[in-house]
Image: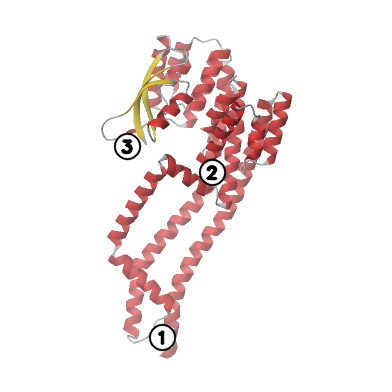
Amino acid sequence: MMRFTYTAISSTGKTVKGVIEADDRSSAVGSLKKQQLKPLVVNQSKGLNISFLNKKKVKTKDIAIFTRQLSTMISAGVPMNRAFYTLQEQADSKYFQKVIGEMAKLIEGGSSIGDTLRHYPNIFDDIYINMVIAGEAGGILDDILKRLASQLEKNETIKKKIKSATTYPKVVFGITILAFIVVMNFIVPKIGAMLHELNPNAQLPMLTRIMIAISDFSKKYAVFIVIALLIVSFLVRRYINTSKGKYKYHSLLLRLPILKVVITKIAIARFARTFSSLMSAGVTVNKAIKVTAGSMGNKVLEKELLDAAKDVEAGKQLSECIAKSKYYPPIVSQMLAIGEETGETDQILVKIADFYEEEVDATIESLSSLLEPLMIVILGGMVGLVAASVMGPLSSLSSSI
């Protein structure tokens, strides 16, 4: 990711300056347009980009708490600048406290909340900013902030469930790799030397010879192996961070049977929840589709929505575009069509979101119950492989004595 400084005109006609991160200049311009900004100057920051070392973030939980509290204070009629200063004192993160204080000063200077949020793209995404702008324009900011808080909380809950479901397999996989390294570098060489001492002329089984050869190779070229792995890992990560690489990586994930189901269901839940919130905030259909595309979490599914936005501009219904996609189940397009016919698209989408969030929960639980025994089988298989390579020749030698 590269850093770009920009100067742009907001929807209210004010000049906005800031810094944005993107894969390239065209991506940076696209991100600014999604925030309803008209870019005037977009230049790449000079110097070494070490943002990954010093980039500060705010936890989703903290943003959700801030959003819900701000909604409550607006509903109670608290003046906006006072509300921000009060929330500054309550924030747990020192960095977030500083940001809220800066936002309060900008609001005191006459800036709208939407324009203020644009100064912090690393904290508030396009969806958040566009919904706040729509809420301000429609005079329903408190209600929009409640929806945003609920959406952030639901997204955080899904992330926690995924993290919880994958923690045990990750630990077992780590133990498996560590055990394999220890066995191949310390135990196998000693066993090989012992077998050679017992019978120097003995012909060892093929499996044993392969294990000893792998052990000798890993010990001899350990430094080169580590360096090669680090270089390959760096190059792969760098390629995946490019637009082309990320698209191919996400396309690969959608070809994997189990992951495809999980990724698709999470994406559909996000699409339905986000699009519903934007529609209820008064954002136009085409704008809502484009903003929602950025929340999908998968570049392939994002492109599908952006293509749908072009068809909607040409006069087609969104349900028709969704029906053509191979990633969205028929129930999504059918329920969306009903919403379009009845004029209750936002309410129908909320039901779709609720349904698929429940589906995500069930899928994650079943995936967790499947991964745990699978990792145990892999660990047991590795132990069995080492045991077979050792016990085979030992048994032959003992029978020949």
Q: Looking at the picture, which amino acid does disc 1 mark? A: Leu
Whichever of callouts 1 and 3 sits on the residue coming sooner in the sequence is 3
Residue 77 image point, x, y percent = 54, 9
Identify residue for label 1. 397
Left or right of 139 on screen, residue 320 = right
| Labelled pair 1, 2 in contact (Cβ < 8 Å) | no
Q: Nearer the viewer, mark 1 or mark 2?
A: 2
Badge 2 marks a residue whose secondary structure is: helix
Residue 199 vertical placement versus 349 (above, below): below
Q: Nearer the viewer, residue 109 or 234?
A: 234
Q: Nearer the viewer, mark 1 or mark 3?
A: 3
Mark 3 → mark 2, Cα distance in angstroms: 26 Å
Badge 1 marks a residue whose secondary structure is: helix
Mark 1 → mark 3, Cα distance in angstroms: 57 Å
Residue 267 image point, x, y percent = 57, 38
Residue 367 image point, x, y percent = 58, 50
Left or right of 298 on screen, residue 345 = right
Q: Quadrant of the C terminus?
A: bottom left
Residue 24 image point, x, y percent = 38, 34
Identify residue for label 3. 53
Whichever of callouts 3 and 2 sits on the residue coming sooner in the sequence is 3
**Disc 1 residue crowd, few under 14, some 14–19, many 20+, Cα 10 Å:** some
Left or right of 207 on screen, residue 166 = right
Q: Looking at the picture, which amino acid does disc 2 mark? A: Ile
Instruction: Name the image quarter holding residue 284.
Output: top right
Residue at (41, 13) in percent of width and height: 14
Residue 354 vertical placement versus 341 (above, below): below
Identify residue for label 2. 162
Badge 3 marks a residue whose secondary structure is: helix
Q: Nearer the viewer, residue 13 or 184?
A: 13
